[in-house]
Each structure stands twice: as C-alpha cells, then as structure tokens.
Amino acid sequence: MLVPRLAMRNLLGAGLRTWLNVVVLSIAYVTIIWTQGFNIGMYQQISRSQIDAEYGGGQYWNENYDPYDPFALQEAHGVIPSTLQKWVRDRKATPLLITQGTIYPNGRIRTILLKGIDPEQKVLTIPSHFLTGESAMVPALIGNRMAKSTGLRIGDSVTLRWRDRDGTFDARDVEIVQIMRTSVQSIDNNQIWIPLETLQGMTQMEGEATLVVIDQQIGLKEKIEGWSFQSQDVLLKDIRDMMKARTISRGILYVILLFLAMLAIFNTQILSIFRRRKEMGTLMALGLTRAKLILLFTLEGAMHGLLAAIISAVYGIPLLTYFTFKGWPLPQSMDQYGIAIGDKLFPEYSAALIVGTTAVILLVTTVVSYLPSRRIAKLKPTDALRGKMT
Amino acid sequence: MENEFLIQTEDLVKIYPMGDHSLVALDHVNLTFKKGEFAGLVGPSGSGKTTLLNIVGSLDTPTEGSALVLGEKVEHLSHKKSAELRNKHIGFIFQTFNLLPVYTVYENVEFPLLLLHMSPADRQKLVMDALEWVGLADRAKSKPSQLSGGQSQRVAIARAIVKKPEIVLADEPTANLDAENSHHILQTMERLNRTLQTTFVFSTHDQKVIQYLRRKITLLDGKVDKDELIDTKRN
C-alpha cells in the first residue's frame, strides 16, 4: 500500500495541474456515460413503442406479404389458420388485414394503407375500441401525423376507394372517430384503421388476414404452413441497425473525447517525468526500486482516472438521475426522422454501462500513464540526481 | 561482519565515454573506511569525489575494480539489491538538499522508514527523534518551500540519519549554505557521528568542512593524492 499512498500524496500535492486533468477527464467520462445512456434509452424507448403498438410478441405473416412491396398486398391474405384462431379467440393474438386504398381529403387524392383491426383487441396499444361505435359511415381511426397531413379532424368524413379481392373498385365514406397520438410512424403515416370485419366484408375476404400479431406474453413460434413467423428480433432489426450506425458515430465522439483527456494526462506524465528527474534520483537514493518508481508514476497517472470517477460521481449522479426521471425534451423536428420517439427521451444507465465505462477510463488512463513511465527503467540514479535524462 | 572496514575499494576505475574519447573519473583508487569515521574527499572539480561517493553509495557501478560496501560488492548488485542496500544502510545528503517538494518536513524524514515498512508508532518516534537532533521538531508540518537553506539541509540530514544507517554520504553538503549555516550543519553531523558512531564520508572543497574532518583524502585527476588523518581542534 506504500506506493498507492505515495502516488495519491504526490498527485494531490501537484495541486491545480492534477485538478485540471481530473476535471477534463471527468467531463469526458460523464459525457460518455450520458450519451451512451441516451443511446440505450432511445433504443429501449423506440423498441418498446414499436413492440407495444405494432410488433407485439412477433407476427405471423401471410407468405405473400412483403411490407416493402405495396403491390403484393392484393395477394397477401389468407384464412387465419386454426392454430392462430384459438389465440385470437382468447385475445392472445390479433389479426390485421391490410390493403391499399385511396382517399380524397379536401378534394385531393391520396394513396393510403387500409388496415382492418379487431376493435376488441388488447394485443396492441392502438386505441381500436374507438371503432366500436354505431355509425352510418365506416368508423375510422387515424394517427396525428396523418391527421395533420390530410387536415382531417374527428367527425370529418372522407371518401374511401378500394379494390375487393377480384380487383373491382368500390367506394364508401368513412368517418374519423378518433385521432390517436402515437410516436410510432409506421402505424400512422398514410394509414387508416377500420374494424377488421368491416374491411373483410368490403374486400370479400371474410375470415382472412394479412398478418397476425401475437401477444408479448406468448412464446409462440410454431411453424404454420403458408405463414411465416417474424420474431420481435427480426422485426426490430431495422431499429437495431439504425442504432448500431448511431453507436458507431457516437463511438467516434467518445474516442475523440477520450483522446483529448488522455492527451492531457500523457502530456502531464511526460512533463512530470521530465521535471521530476531529480526527485526520481532522490527516491532511488533513498532506496526506492526502479520497478516501484515506475509503479509510482504509473499509479499517479492512473489515479487521475480514479479521482475523475469520484468527481464525476459528485455531479454526474444528480445530473444523470435528473434526466432519467425528467427526460430530455426533444425538438419537434425529431418527428421527421421516422423513429418512434416521443416528446421526451428518457436515458437509461445500466450498471454494466457505468462499470464498463469506468473500467475503460481507468484502463486507458493507466496505459497512457505507463507508456511515458517506462522511460524511468532506463534512468541512471546518478543522471537523475543531476537532473539529466538517460 | 568479518571485514573490519565498512567500505573498501580495490583498484576502482570509472571511465565515462565522451563521444570519440573517454574521461577517466577514477583511476585505480584503493581506500578503506572504518566504522565511525568522519572523512572527507577533497579535491578540485572533476577530481572524482562525487563519482567515488556514487559508487560507494551503489548509485553507480565501477568500470573496473571493486567497491565492497558492508560486505556487498556494489558492482555485482542487482538494481533491487542496491536499492535495498541504500534503503537499509546508507544515508545521502545532497548539495541541493533534494527534499521532496510536496511532502512536509515530517513526511520527508519519514520516507526512508516507509520503505522499511516500519509501524506508524515506530516511525513517529524515529522521525521526531531525528528532527529533535537537528533542532527542527517545531517545523515538522512545514513544507520545504517554507524553509531556509540551512533548515532544508538539516531536514536532509534528519532524513539521512533517521533510519540510523551505518554510512552517511554527503556530497558538498554546505555548498549552498552561508558560513553560519554551514557550521551549524557540520556541528550537527559531527555530533551525530560521535553519538551514533555513524560513518560520514563527505565530498567537498569547502574549507569550512575540511576544518571539521578527522580524515582528509585528497583526490587529483581520479587518483588518491593524499590520505591524511587530521587532529582538529574539536578532536
């Protein structure tokens, strides 16, 4: 324990030089944890929103369904298999029928996705219960973005045109019964939700669906002929890929931050070893071995990391806790990025993130402290006492 | 120890390579020092005083010959062993005091004892004793920057003798001090030499120091020119 004690004594004795390095390192440290926390929080928030509103515990897709090919929709439907019907009856799964349609809001033509959903379903957080009301017109639910872009409001009616299973065009008026506030754009933009049975009737696809969303609590992965199972993992792949790309770009920022902090420590170490040659000589004359001298100087540098962690804890914990509970308000423009994120972003800080970042900081600090300290191994005590570098 | 000498050099040679040529700092030096000696290496700059002191203090190794210190041949010691020899048995006093600037007087004196892994109670007793000897017990909490040159050198002496070493090597200890402080320092060292029977070896060309020596070894161009016992007034 002698060398760590001496190292701490030397470090604190160095005064302002130490604290400047510690503050720089601490800022880098908190920034890394902070931004990482935002990244994790963003991924969790987007994933949760997507799962709750769209993906559920996974989806069974009709074999012809391709979400990236609207022309395939005409053929992408089939009778709900008996295995899934049981789950649908028990409200553990909900079928969706999707077809293309056209609406004419305020005299303008607009191509939309027409989605049929069971008004009684509990699998997704879509407020489908609004579709149960009695009305002469077909009740329809739209999202806030769709409402904004079309100018439609609750109580408005709009003409809807679609094709049935034989390709015959038909048209009816639908009434907007509710505008849902959602952060998930893939259930909102250019989409109209109507009762499933109504859409099945309109398209002559009774008992059929395009896909069936499974409840999150059910671990159903059974193979069903004509239907392919898309797990949560598969459905979240795009989000994961996007976050991975963000992580790389943020990683570059961390490296730059860390590099700047480490440069300060590296310089301090170099300067320190250069300036303190006489002191090193004295320590050797007093009987400190070279190995211990290297350890002493390495520890002095490495302890910058330790002090930075302590300082970071002092102001970082309250700061990060505040944002964890209050969230970080996001600008309106975030809504245009196409990611399911609300008005606020709630960062998440895991123990692994904090321990991992601390370990990385301590490790890197130790390495940059050790590198210049290695020169001491070549130092001759007589040269050091004369203030010379061997 | 079988050998009656604490220090014994045999045909000690130290050559420094200087580019194309080389500089002979010590040229076949044969010397011995017994316990309790108060001896000085005297001579002009470049005569080899400090080099000899460094080799005896196991801070440096000879090019040829041998330096036997407390039964150990310094030229054969590993880095670790020479550090151990210095830590346990040799005290150093430097011309420029070489106090550790961020430590207090107490901590500076305590340092060699920390390396010896002594208990805190033992350390405290020895440090305070050493500071009493040099008359600086009341400045224990001061930093080196708050001390005068004389006081700093007294702290260095306390640091050198706190572990009660067999040998103290003092390299030009009064070079940075005025006359009054020099005498004070020398009287302190002489008192310690008599009380503790510590062997003091100085390197100096200061007349103030020379008048205190009981043995004067004159070095000239790396060779022993004279080795004489002095009957000082104080003796």
Image (cartoon, coloured by chain):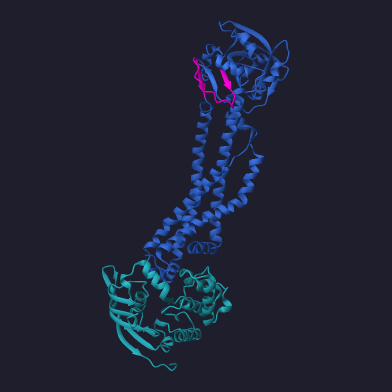
Chain colours: A blue, B cyan
Q: Quadrant of residue A148?
A: top right
| Vertical relation: A373 (above or below) A81 | below
Q: Quadrant of residue A18?
A: bottom right
Residue at the (61%, 30%) spot, across then down: A335
Query: What kind of secondary structure does the magenta stretch mostly adopt?
Result: loop
Q: Quadrant of residue A166?
A: top right
* Residue A152 visible from this viewpoint: no
| Residue placed most toward the observer, B107 or A260 | B107
Query: Is residue A218 magenta-colored?
Result: yes
| Vertical relation: A296 (above or below) A245 | below
Pinpoint residue B181: horizontal percent, then vertical percent: 50, 84
- Residue B31 relative to residue A42: left or right: left
- Residue B153 relative to residue A375: left or right: right
Pinpoint residue A305: horizontal percent, then vertical percent: 52, 54
| Residue placed most toward the observer, A25 or B35 | B35
- Residue A285 relative to residue B12: left or right: right
| Vertical relation: A120 (above or below) A239 | above
Pinpoint residue A203: horizontal percent, then vertical percent: 60, 9
Query: Is residue A138 magenta-colored?
Result: no
Pinpoint residue B96: horizontal percent, then vertical percent: 46, 75
* Residue B88 visible from this viewpoint: yes
Q: Quadrant of the C terminus of chain A?
A: bottom left
Residue at the (72%, 10%) spot, across then down: A136
Q: Which residues are magenta?
A: A210-230
